[in-house]
Amino acid sequence: MTRNMHQKITCRTQALAPTSAGEQQENWQDIAVVWAEVIPKSADMALSARQNHMITTYRVRVRYQDNLLPTRNILWQEQAYRVTRLLNPDNRKRILEFEMVEDHL
């Protein structure tokens, strides 16, 4: 089950930091760098700003760690991905499964 975890990913959470103007700015804070299995799940065309672009959804499997539960963003191959779903598929705290899409923002 875990023998295919050959991809290194960085799990990140959203954090607020004060700016010099006293406002709150959203930043990404690294939680952990872990080995994962990354599997393409589906690809769809989407229209954004009057341009078509491909949106690929991936399934990511990692060993279960409590500190990964707040993950909202994943860096993989120098590209940011937005986490759309987080599952503990067998409810035994062995594997965490993320669903992610490329973050175009």
Image (cartoon, rainbow, N blue to C red):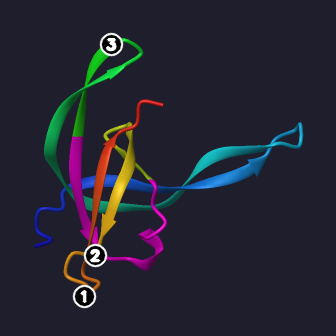
Q: Earlier in the sequence, mark 1 or mark 3?
A: 3
Q: Quadrant of the N terminus?
A: bottom left
* Foreground tag (2 vs 3): 3
The disc labelled 2 sits on which kind of residue? Asn
Judging by the rendered image, the residue that carries numbered circle 2 is 88
Q: Residue furthest top?
A: 50
Q: What span is in magenta?
A: 57-72
Judging by the rendered image, the residue that carries numbered circle 1 is 92
Task: Compute the Cα span from label 1 to label 3.
Answer: 43 Å
User: Above or below — where is 91 with respect to 41?
Assistant: below
The disc labelled 3 sits on which kind of residue? Gln
Residue 23 percent coordinates (x, y): 83, 42
User: Above or below — where is 88 with respect to 71?
Assistant: below
Q: Are marks 1 and 2 in contact (CB under 8 Å)?
A: yes
Is residue 67 a member of the stretch shown in magenta?
Answer: yes
Task: Compute the Cα span from label 1 to label 2.
Answer: 8 Å
Q: Earlier in the sequence, mark 2 or mark 3?
A: 3
Is residue 1 a member of the stretch shown in magenta?
Answer: no
